[in-house]
């Protein structure tokens, strides 16, 4: 995953997205795949949709938004995540400001850090 201080909402790789209704609620099933080939299918309630503005000549993109439990080190929270096919990107998940606000410190000069103390490499 990638920490993205510019993204308001987190995003994850989702394929085979199928939306349906159950008991009057909008639902979605999808398959998450990471870059190591691990796959897992999820079914979640759609809590919102994100309309992504398109570049000139392309049509706007509408993505379902679901609540997902996300854990990074000691930080574990339920956050809104939009679903999109990210297979063309290196990172299968982006953690945006809606997760980072829970005390995650981002170091722009380092990669792959996970620790409790600032400056502990």
Image: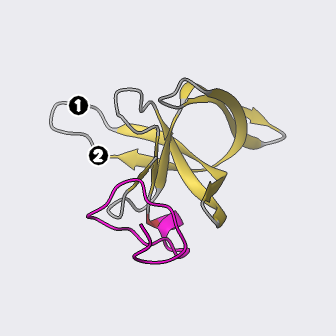
Residue 18, can we see it?
A: no
Which residue is disc 2 drawn over? 53
Q: Which quarter of the picture shows residue 18?
A: top right
**SS majority, magenta:** loop
Residue 101, can we see it?
A: yes
**Magenta stretch, residue numbers:** 98-121
Q: CA distance from mark 1 to mark 2?
A: 9 Å
Residue 36 percent location from the top left of the image: 51, 27
Which residue is disc 1 drawn over? 58
Outermost residue on the right side: it is: 23
Badge 1 density bin: few <14, some 14–19, many ≥20, Cα 10 Å:
few
Residue appearing at x 63%, y 55% in the figure: 70
Name the side, left or right, on which 51 lies relative to 72: left
Circle 1 SS class:
loop
Residue 118 percent location from the top left of the image: 43, 78
Circle 2 SS class:
loop
Toward the viewer: 52 or 15? 15
Residue 98 percent location from the top left of the image: 50, 66
In which quadrant will I find the C terminus?
bottom left
90 relative to 114, above or below: above
Residue 14 percent location from the top left of the image: 53, 32
Residue appearing at x 29%, y 32% in the figure: 59
Render colour scheme? secondary structure
Asked if residue 14 is among those painted magenta in the image, a careful observer would answer no
Asked if residue 107 is among those painted magenta in the image, a careful observer would answer yes
């Amino acid at each position: 995953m990638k920490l993205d201080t510019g993204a308001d909402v987190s995003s994850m790789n989702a394929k085979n997205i199928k939306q349906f209704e159950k008991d009057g609620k909008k639902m979605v099933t999808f398959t998450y795949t990471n870059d190591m080939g691990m796959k897992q299918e999820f079914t979640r309630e759609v809590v919102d949709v994100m309309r992504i503005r398109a570049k000139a000549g392309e049509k706007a993109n509408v993505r379902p938004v679901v609540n997902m439990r996300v854990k990074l080190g000691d930080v574990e929270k339920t956050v809104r995540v939009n679903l999109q096919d990210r297979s063309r990107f290196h990172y299968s998940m982006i953690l945006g400001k809606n997760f980072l606000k829970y005390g995650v410190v981002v170091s722009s000069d380092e990669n792959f850090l996970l620790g409790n103390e600032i400056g502990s490499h």
